[in-house]
Image (tube, rainbow, N blue to C red):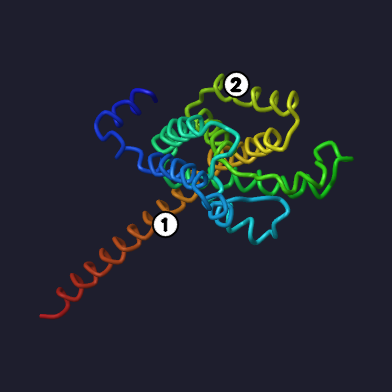
Amino acid sequence: MFGAVRERLVERKFAAVPLATAATLLIMMFSVIQHLPGGERFVTSIGVVRASLPLEVSLLRTPLSLYVPALDLPVWGALAQVFLVFGLAEIVLGRRMTLVIAYVCTLAGTLFARVAVAVGPDHLLGFPRWVAHVRDTGPSAAVVGLALCIAFRCRAWFTGGTVLVLMIGEAVILPNLAGLEHVVALMAAMLIAASVEVFGGFWPRVLAGVVAATAIAAAGRAGEARRRGAAAGTVIP
């Protein structure tokens, strides 16, 4: 895997991973904007998700919330994680699958936050009401989900197991919203990886069968037409 990745990066450089490059630049841009006068309000209005927001607003902001870094964490960490993991995913999984996994894992974390606040602190996975007003942004859920899917695709079981152990350990040792969202993102990623493994080749095989059957039927009709033409030629002088 790393040989293919290195070869592609050497040949095309940043053009080899346009999605990872664009995601990294978006995070950098939002980081700069939200530290400008009035910038935080602008970023909040288009890309910050909170469990207290109406569901439709959260759903609209979720795609951009992935690229809005946390205010209390160093942005260089998010930049490095996104470029590395998104770049590997883009090469190993493909651009479309990378986007799907990143969005689904982020959305799973966003929806979990709403459920956790709704059930309340009396539940094992619940949180008090004030958590609904916590800013819930950043690429971490997408990063851990993509890392697990890359490990699954490459059969890197030790790496995948390490990611699982670290994220579950984080949720147990530091029980906060971000830690549990990471676990939920891993669960969503495992479902996607398993579904692709089981059903990923199903529809391509069906389509290939349909195409083959159509070609055989067309060849049969053409052969029948030639035979009829030959028979008609022997009858008519």
Considering depth in this image, is 5 or 125 the residue closer to the camera? 125
Residue 151 place in picture, x, y as percent: 52, 28
Q: Amino acid at mark 2?
A: Thr
From the image, which quarter does the N terminus lie in?
A: top left
- Residue that mark 1 sits on: 210
Answer left or right for 26 relative to 110.
left
Snapshot quadrant of residue 109: top right
Residue positioned most to the front:
37
Residue positioned most to the top:
158
Considering depth in this image, is 196 or 204 the residue closer to the camera? 196
Residue 181 place in picture, x, y as percent: 67, 38
Q: Between tags 1 and 2, which lies in front?
A: 2
Gap between marks 1 and 2 measured at Cα: 42 Å
Q: Residue at x 30, y 31 (%)?
A: 8
What number is the disc on residue 6?
none
Q: Is residue 215 above or below residue 185?
A: below
Q: Amino acid at mark 1?
A: Val
Answer left or right for 178 relative to 160.
right
Considering depth in this image, is 145 or 152 the residue closer to the camera? 145
- Residue that mark 2 sits on: 162
Residue positioned most to the bottom:
236
